[in-house]
């Protein structure tokens, strides 16, 4: 599976679900079960690679602002959700997290920002296709996120690092 195929599956499932993260996960499983088990494993590897690339302090800070706080689990679910938003939003947010203020113009912290089930879509599809769990991909998560630590609770630090997000989502 090529990267363009991966992103097409993500986009197709998001469009089919009208942006609802739970429905997107279901739509993605449905699409993945139309592929071969090897293609599903390739998809899982591509998803996991993006999930790991997004394990960055700067992105975590952006999630903290968008979601009014983000525990480690919440940040995991946010990274799944961010992948589900498609290549442009994912790459844009990864390279310049503050740009999420522009890329997510209609972000709703009650409905957006968490898509845990999207992270398990390949597992579910593989099991439906083969009756077996998805094999271990051999990609352990790093112990700490990439980048310098930030104090997410310090309004001065957050306003300096994320001027656009702070203006929209900052809490005083």
Image (cartoon, rainbow, N blue to C red):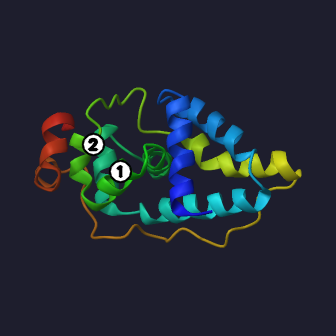
Residue at 70% over, 38% down: 30
* Residue at 30% in and 39% down: 66
Question: Where is residue 57 shown, x and y percent of the image?
Answer: 33, 62
Q: Is residue 92 visible?
A: yes
Above or below 21: residue 86: below
> What is the x, y in percent for residue 137?
68, 68
Instruction: Using a 10 Å C-alpha cutoff, classify the residue at mark 1 as few (fewer than 14 neighbours), some (14 to 19) or many (20 or more).
Output: few
Which is more toward the observer, 149 or 103? 103
Identify residue for label 2. 103
Give the side of residue 45 with respect to residue 90, left or right.
right
Quadrant in the picture for the N terminus:
bottom right
Please say whether residue 172 is visible from this viewpoint.
no
Could you say where residue 54 lies in the image, as x and y percent from the top left?
Answer: 41, 60
Which residue is identified by label 1?
88
Q: Is residue 112 left or right of residue 28?
A: left
Please provide percent x and percent y for residue 16.
Answer: 55, 30
Disc 2, disc 1: CB below 8 Å?
yes
Secondary structure at badge 1 equals: helix
Q: Nearer the viewer, mark 2 or mark 1?
A: 1
Q: Residue at x 59, y 29 (%)?
A: 23
Choose the circle earlier in sequence order: 2 or 1: 1
In the rendered view, tell whether residue 67 sits above or below residue 59: above
In the rendered image, which quarter contains the C terminus? Answer: top left
Q: Secondary structure at mark 2?
A: helix
Work out how far the residue at label 2 is from the one at label 1, CA to CA, in angstroms.
8 Å
109 and 156: which is toward the camera: 109
Q: Is residue 159 left or right of residue 132?
A: left
Most distant residue in the right direction: 131
Q: Quadrant of residue 150?
A: bottom left
């Amino acid at each position: 599976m090529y990267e363009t195929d991966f992103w097409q599956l993500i986009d197709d499932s998001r469009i089919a679900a009208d942006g609802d993260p739970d429905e997107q996960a279901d739509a993605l499983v449905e699409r993945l079960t139309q592929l071969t088990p090897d293609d599903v494993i390739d998809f899982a590897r591509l998803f996991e690679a993006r999930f790991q690339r997004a394990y960055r302090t700067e992105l975590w800070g952006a999630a903290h602002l968008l979601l009014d706080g983000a525990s480690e689990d919440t940040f995991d679910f946010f990274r799944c959700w961010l992948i589900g938003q498609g290549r442009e939003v994912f790459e844009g947010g990864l390279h310049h997290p503050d740009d999420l203020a522009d890329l997510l113009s209609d972000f709703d912290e009650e409905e957006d920002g968490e898509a845990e089930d999207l992270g398990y879509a390949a597992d579910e599809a593989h099991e439906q296709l083969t009756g077996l769990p998805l094999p271990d991909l051999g990609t352990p998560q790093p112990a700490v996120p990439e980048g310098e630590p930030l104090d997410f609770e310090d309004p001065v630090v957050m306003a300096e690092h994320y001027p656009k997000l702070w203006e929209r989502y900052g809490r005083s």
